[in-house]
Amino acid sequence: MPLAGPPSRPPGFLDSVVPLHDASFHPAGVAVAQIVTLPGQVVLSLILVLVAARRLWTGGRVEAAVCWPATWLLGVAVELVFRHTLSRPPLYRHGVHLTALDMSWPSGHALRSALVAAALAAAWPRLRIPLAVWLVAAVVLLAGFHTPTDVAGGLLLATAAAAGAAAVERSALLGRGAALRRRAALGRTRPGP
Protein backbone atom coordinates (compact mmCIF):
# COMPACT_ATOMS: atom_id res chain seq x y z
CA MET A 1 0.00 0.00 0.00
CA PRO A 2 2.60 2.53 -1.07
CA LEU A 3 0.09 5.37 -1.54
CA ALA A 4 -1.63 4.91 1.82
CA GLY A 5 0.45 7.67 3.40
CA PRO A 6 0.65 8.23 7.12
CA PRO A 7 -1.88 6.52 9.39
CA SER A 8 -5.16 8.38 9.53
CA ARG A 9 -8.67 8.06 10.79
CA PRO A 10 -11.30 6.16 8.81
CA PRO A 11 -13.17 8.40 6.35
CA GLY A 12 -16.17 10.18 7.87
CA PHE A 13 -19.59 10.84 6.38
CA LEU A 14 -18.56 14.15 4.83
CA ASP A 15 -15.48 12.52 3.28
CA SER A 16 -17.74 9.90 1.70
CA VAL A 17 -20.31 12.34 0.34
CA VAL A 18 -18.23 15.29 -0.89
CA PRO A 19 -15.83 14.41 -3.72
CA LEU A 20 -12.18 15.08 -2.84
CA HIS A 21 -13.12 16.51 0.58
CA ASP A 22 -10.00 16.50 2.73
CA ALA A 23 -8.13 14.64 -0.05
CA SER A 24 -4.37 14.65 -0.14
CA PHE A 25 -2.65 15.51 -3.41
CA HIS A 26 0.90 14.89 -2.31
CA PRO A 27 2.92 13.08 -3.61
CA ALA A 28 2.07 13.12 -7.31
CA GLY A 29 1.04 9.43 -7.27
CA VAL A 30 -1.64 10.21 -4.71
CA ALA A 31 -2.95 13.10 -6.82
CA VAL A 32 -3.19 10.87 -9.90
CA ALA A 33 -4.95 8.16 -7.87
CA GLN A 34 -7.44 10.68 -6.42
CA ILE A 35 -8.41 11.91 -9.90
CA VAL A 36 -8.50 8.52 -11.68
CA THR A 37 -10.59 6.88 -8.94
CA LEU A 38 -12.94 9.87 -8.53
CA PRO A 39 -15.82 8.19 -10.45
CA GLY A 40 -15.82 5.54 -7.69
CA GLN A 41 -16.71 8.14 -5.05
CA VAL A 42 -20.17 7.61 -3.53
CA VAL A 43 -22.14 10.58 -4.89
CA LEU A 44 -20.38 10.80 -8.24
CA SER A 45 -20.74 7.06 -8.88
CA LEU A 46 -24.48 7.24 -8.17
CA ILE A 47 -24.84 10.18 -10.55
CA LEU A 48 -22.96 8.31 -13.30
CA VAL A 49 -25.11 5.19 -12.82
CA LEU A 50 -28.25 7.34 -12.99
CA VAL A 51 -26.98 8.97 -16.21
CA ALA A 52 -26.45 5.49 -17.67
CA ALA A 53 -29.93 4.47 -16.49
CA ARG A 54 -31.45 7.50 -18.18
CA ARG A 55 -29.70 6.59 -21.44
CA LEU A 56 -30.92 2.99 -21.16
CA TRP A 57 -34.47 4.15 -20.41
CA THR A 58 -34.62 6.46 -23.42
CA GLY A 59 -33.16 3.65 -25.53
CA GLY A 60 -36.07 1.39 -24.56
CA ARG A 61 -34.06 -0.88 -22.25
CA VAL A 62 -36.36 -0.45 -19.28
CA GLU A 63 -35.12 -3.51 -17.39
CA ALA A 64 -31.52 -2.32 -17.55
CA ALA A 65 -32.53 1.22 -16.63
CA VAL A 66 -34.16 -0.08 -13.46
CA CYS A 67 -31.55 -2.73 -12.70
CA TRP A 68 -28.38 -0.59 -12.66
CA PRO A 69 -29.47 1.93 -9.99
CA ALA A 70 -30.96 -0.95 -7.96
CA THR A 71 -27.69 -2.85 -8.35
CA TRP A 72 -25.71 0.18 -7.17
CA LEU A 73 -27.95 0.58 -4.11
CA LEU A 74 -27.83 -3.11 -3.25
CA GLY A 75 -24.06 -3.30 -3.76
CA VAL A 76 -23.40 -0.28 -1.54
CA ALA A 77 -25.78 -1.63 1.11
CA VAL A 78 -24.00 -5.00 1.16
CA GLU A 79 -20.64 -3.20 1.33
CA LEU A 80 -21.79 -1.23 4.38
CA VAL A 81 -23.14 -4.33 6.11
CA PHE A 82 -19.87 -6.18 5.52
CA ARG A 83 -17.78 -3.26 6.72
CA HIS A 84 -19.70 -2.98 9.97
CA THR A 85 -20.08 -6.68 10.74
CA LEU A 86 -16.80 -8.22 9.63
CA SER A 87 -13.62 -7.52 11.50
CA ARG A 88 -10.03 -8.33 10.71
CA PRO A 89 -6.95 -8.39 12.85
CA PRO A 90 -5.33 -4.96 13.10
CA LEU A 91 -2.88 -4.06 10.36
CA TYR A 92 0.38 -2.29 11.17
CA ARG A 93 2.80 -0.28 9.05
CA HIS A 94 6.17 0.54 10.58
CA GLY A 95 4.76 -0.43 13.98
CA VAL A 96 1.76 1.96 13.72
CA HIS A 97 -1.80 0.59 13.74
CA LEU A 98 -3.58 1.50 10.49
CA THR A 99 -7.04 2.18 11.91
CA ALA A 100 -8.41 3.31 8.53
CA LEU A 101 -8.02 -0.28 7.29
CA ASP A 102 -9.81 -1.93 10.21
CA MET A 103 -13.14 -1.78 8.41
CA SER A 104 -12.09 -1.46 4.77
CA TRP A 105 -13.26 -4.80 3.34
CA PRO A 106 -14.59 -4.76 0.67
CA SER A 107 -13.21 -1.67 -1.06
CA GLY A 108 -16.15 0.60 -1.79
CA HIS A 109 -14.19 2.47 -4.45
CA ALA A 110 -13.42 -0.78 -6.27
CA LEU A 111 -17.06 -1.85 -6.01
CA ARG A 112 -18.48 1.44 -7.23
CA SER A 113 -15.84 1.90 -9.95
CA ALA A 114 -16.67 -1.51 -11.40
CA LEU A 115 -20.41 -0.82 -11.24
CA VAL A 116 -19.95 2.57 -12.92
CA ALA A 117 -17.89 0.98 -15.70
CA ALA A 118 -20.46 -1.78 -16.20
CA ALA A 119 -23.46 0.57 -16.20
CA LEU A 120 -21.82 3.02 -18.62
CA ALA A 121 -20.75 0.12 -20.85
CA ALA A 122 -24.34 -1.13 -20.89
CA ALA A 123 -25.58 2.33 -21.90
CA TRP A 124 -22.79 3.10 -24.39
CA PRO A 125 -21.37 -0.20 -25.71
CA ARG A 126 -18.81 1.61 -27.90
CA LEU A 127 -17.11 2.83 -24.70
CA ARG A 128 -16.41 -0.68 -23.38
CA ILE A 129 -12.68 -0.67 -24.16
CA PRO A 130 -11.94 2.80 -22.72
CA LEU A 131 -14.04 1.94 -19.66
CA ALA A 132 -12.16 -1.33 -19.19
CA VAL A 133 -8.83 0.52 -19.44
CA TRP A 134 -10.03 3.10 -16.91
CA LEU A 135 -11.23 0.36 -14.54
CA VAL A 136 -7.89 -1.46 -14.70
CA ALA A 137 -6.07 1.81 -13.97
CA ALA A 138 -8.41 2.58 -11.09
CA VAL A 139 -7.98 -0.89 -9.58
CA VAL A 140 -4.19 -0.69 -9.85
CA LEU A 141 -4.22 2.72 -8.16
CA LEU A 142 -6.67 1.57 -5.49
CA ALA A 143 -4.23 -1.19 -4.62
CA GLY A 144 -1.92 1.61 -3.50
CA PHE A 145 -4.42 2.56 -0.78
CA HIS A 146 -6.05 -0.76 0.09
CA THR A 147 -4.90 -4.25 0.81
CA PRO A 148 -5.22 -6.60 -2.18
CA THR A 149 -8.02 -8.46 -0.40
CA ASP A 150 -10.01 -5.22 0.00
CA VAL A 151 -9.82 -4.52 -3.73
CA ALA A 152 -10.56 -8.13 -4.63
CA GLY A 153 -13.57 -8.13 -2.29
CA GLY A 154 -14.96 -4.98 -3.92
CA LEU A 155 -14.49 -6.42 -7.39
CA LEU A 156 -16.06 -9.73 -6.37
CA LEU A 157 -19.10 -7.96 -4.94
CA ALA A 158 -19.39 -5.81 -8.08
CA THR A 159 -19.16 -8.89 -10.29
CA ALA A 160 -21.96 -10.62 -8.37
CA ALA A 161 -24.12 -7.49 -8.45
CA ALA A 162 -23.53 -6.85 -12.16
CA ALA A 163 -24.25 -10.49 -13.00
CA GLY A 164 -27.53 -10.17 -11.12
CA ALA A 165 -28.44 -7.02 -13.05
CA ALA A 166 -27.61 -8.68 -16.36
CA ALA A 167 -29.65 -11.77 -15.43
CA VAL A 168 -32.70 -9.67 -14.54
CA GLU A 169 -32.39 -7.71 -17.78
CA ARG A 170 -32.05 -10.89 -19.86
CA SER A 171 -35.03 -12.47 -18.13
CA ALA A 172 -37.21 -9.51 -19.18
CA LEU A 173 -38.96 -9.99 -15.87
CA LEU A 174 -39.86 -6.33 -15.61
CA GLY A 175 -40.86 -6.09 -19.27
CA ARG A 176 -43.25 -9.05 -19.06
CA GLY A 177 -45.10 -7.48 -16.17
CA ALA A 178 -45.34 -4.15 -17.99
CA ALA A 179 -46.51 -5.84 -21.21
CA LEU A 180 -49.21 -7.75 -19.32
CA ARG A 181 -50.41 -4.56 -17.66
CA ARG A 182 -50.54 -2.75 -21.03
CA ARG A 183 -52.52 -5.59 -22.63
CA ALA A 184 -54.91 -5.68 -19.69
CA ALA A 185 -55.41 -1.93 -19.89
CA LEU A 186 -56.15 -2.17 -23.61
CA GLY A 187 -58.54 -5.08 -23.09
CA ARG A 188 -56.48 -7.42 -25.26
CA THR A 189 -56.04 -10.21 -22.75
CA ARG A 190 -57.11 -13.64 -23.79
CA PRO A 191 -60.39 -14.86 -22.37
CA GLY A 192 -60.07 -17.40 -19.58
CA PRO A 193 -60.83 -21.12 -20.05
Image: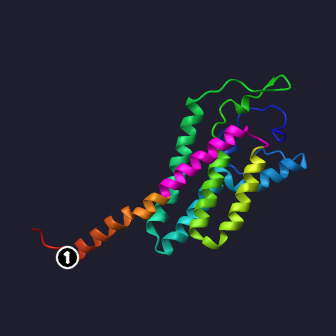
Q: Residue at x 57, y 51 (%)?
A: 159
Judge whether 145 appears above or below 69 on screen.
above
Q: Is residue 158 magenta?
A: yes
Q: Secondary structure at mark 1?
A: loop
Classify 10 Å Cα crowding around label 1: few (below 14), some (14-19), many (20 and above).
few
User: Magenta span covers which residues?
Assistant: 144-165
Three-letter code for the amino acid on which mark 1 is drawn = Gly
Q: Is residue 15 magenta?
A: no
Q: Is residue 155 visible?
A: yes
Q: Position of residue 81 (x, y in %)?
A: 54, 36
From the image, give the main secondary structure of the stretch colored magenta: helix
Q: Residue at x 60, y 60 (%)?
A: 118
Judge whether 122 appears above or below 21 on screen.
below
Q: Residue at x 40, y 62 (%)?
A: 171
Judge whether 110 appears above or below 175 on screen.
above
Looking at the rendered structure, the number of numbered marks drawn on it comes to: 1
Residue behind mark 1: 187
Q: Position of residue 109 (x, y in %)?
A: 67, 47
The residue at the far right in this view is 27
Q: Is residue 17 visible?
A: no
Quarter of the image where one finds residue 169: bottom left
Q: Quadrant of the N terminus?
A: top right
Q: Position of residue 153 (x, y in %)?
A: 63, 41
Q: Quadrant of the C terminus?
A: bottom left
The residue at the far left in this view is 193
